[in-house]
Amino acid sequence: MCYAIPLTITSPLPGDLGHIPVSPAIDFGRLIAEAGLPGRFDPNSIAVIDLTDGRTIPHARAEDFAYADSGRVEWVIENPAHTRYEIRFRTTPQRPPLIPQVYTPLIGTGDLIRYNADVPRPVMIAYSMQLIDLTGDGRTDLVGCWNYYYRPGDPVSGLLCYPRTGNTKILS
């Protein structure tokens, strides 16, 4: 099922700064529970709609959505007169793993490590790593640990899991 969260910018936005990054923290799990909605949050379904012109806005999802139902949804406001948005999302019977976005725009909110490509790129973890089925879907996932963070507020270290989302025979 598809749902929408209205979001209105109430502070005056400067007209002389160009693109303005926006990074609201949204707890989808809490909103779903409070509204009594069926199912689990699908983090891959997030869409940002500019209600002024109806466009779907390119956005980025915080890494928090890899392991939680809350996190930041980030986009750029190009026109300060556009202040009404909708964050759309779906629920599903089971929460799917976070799948990397096909395109993640650069926002300017600490996105130093993001890059986009038309083909899969090699992934590696600098420290201990292993291929195991951590998600329980029958496909091996890349799991390991990391000692680095790239934006304030993120964990400094911890476990990482890159779930396999493609072919079960090819490591991609």
Image (cartoon, rainbow, N blue to C red):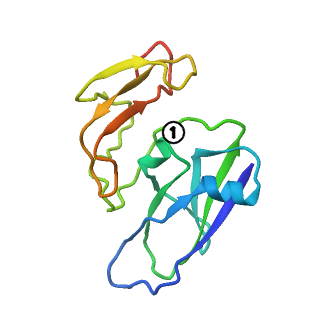
Q: Residue at x 50, y 82 (%)?
A: 81
Assign a secondary structure to mark 1: loop
State which quadrant residue 143 falls in.
top left
State which quadrant residue 152 falls in.
bottom left
Give left or right: position of 93 versus 137: right
Please state the horizontal and vertical placement of residue 109, each as a whole percent of the image: 33, 61
Please state the horizontal and vertical placement of residue 112, each as a whole percent of the image: 26, 52
Please state the horizontal and vertical placement of residue 116, each as a whole percent of the image: 35, 43
Give left or right: position of 88 versus 170: right
* Identity of the residue furthest to the top in this view: 169
Q: Residue at x 27, y 23 (%)?
A: 128
Q: Residue at x 27, y 50 (%)?
A: 150
- Relative depth, front residue between 56 and 101: 101
Q: Disc 1 marks which amino acid? A: Leu
Instruction: From the image, tell me which residue sits under label 1.
Output: 98
Give left or right: position of 17 versus 51: left
Q: Residues within 10 Å of mark 1 (few under 14, many from 20)?
A: many
- Relative depth, front residue between 113 and 150: 150
- Relative depth, front residue between 46 and 62: 62
Please state the horizontal and vertical placement of residue 41, each as a whole percent of the image: 63, 46
Residue 138 vertical placement versus 86 (above, below) = above
Q: Quadrant of the C terminus?
A: top left
Q: Residue at x 46, y 29 (%)?
A: 163
Query: In the rendered picture of this protein, how many numbered marks are placed on residues?
Result: 1
